[in-house]
Amino acid sequence: LSDCMGRLCVPYRGWLTSGNIWVASLLRLGLFPLLICSAKGLYFTHDLFSIAFVYALGFTNGYLGSLSIIFVNEMVTEAETGIVGMFSGFFLNLGLVFGATAACFVEALVLGH
């Protein structure tokens, strides 16, 4: 649901441009330690914190993923948009696969399974 909400908010770009979208991606990385602390019960002990962090990760995934594909397509000529769109979709999905795989390793490290 949150990923879909992020994709629906793409028309509202705010301060993001093709030159600074990496800043938002780096800020998104800050959610991972917060989620780990919540899972371990270190600082964020209420379940609402976990839900909020997961929602924020999903929202930013949909928003930044879709917005980055749009920015890439705006930077190329009309003749190149087809191939660029195909590669953008491929690498977005590849990133999702790597992220899901990394989550399995992080789960084993954090929870000790």
Image (tube, helix red, strand yellow):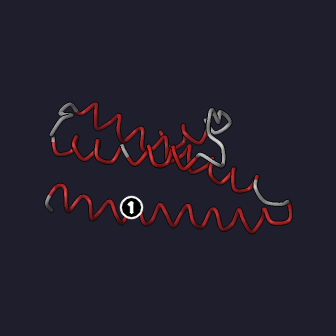
Give percent across and percent down for residue 105: 27, 65
The number of numbered badges drawn on the structure is 1
Q: Residue at x 45, y 65 (%)?
A: 97
Q: Name the side, left or right, on which 10 lies relative to 38.
A: right
Q: Name the side, left or right, on which 48 lies relative to 4.
A: left
Q: Residue at x 55, y 39 (%)?
A: 6
Quadrant assignment for the C terminus: bottom left
Above or below residue 50? Residue 92 is: below
Q: Quadrant of residue 82?
A: bottom right
What residue type is disc 1 on?
Ala
Give percent across and percent down for residue 112: 13, 60
**Which residue has dot 1 on it?**
100
Give percent across and percent down for residue 95: 49, 63
23 or 60, which is in the foreground? 23
Q: Quadrant of residue 46?
A: top left
Q: Residues within 10 Å of mark 1 (few under 14, many from 20)?
A: few
Q: Name the side, left or right, on which 66 lies relative to 109.
A: right
91 or 47, which is in the foreground? 91
Give percent across and percent down for residue 43: 18, 35
Local SS, label 1: helix
Q: Name the side, left or right, on which 93 lies relative to 42.
A: right
Q: Residue at x 24, y 58 (%)?
A: 107
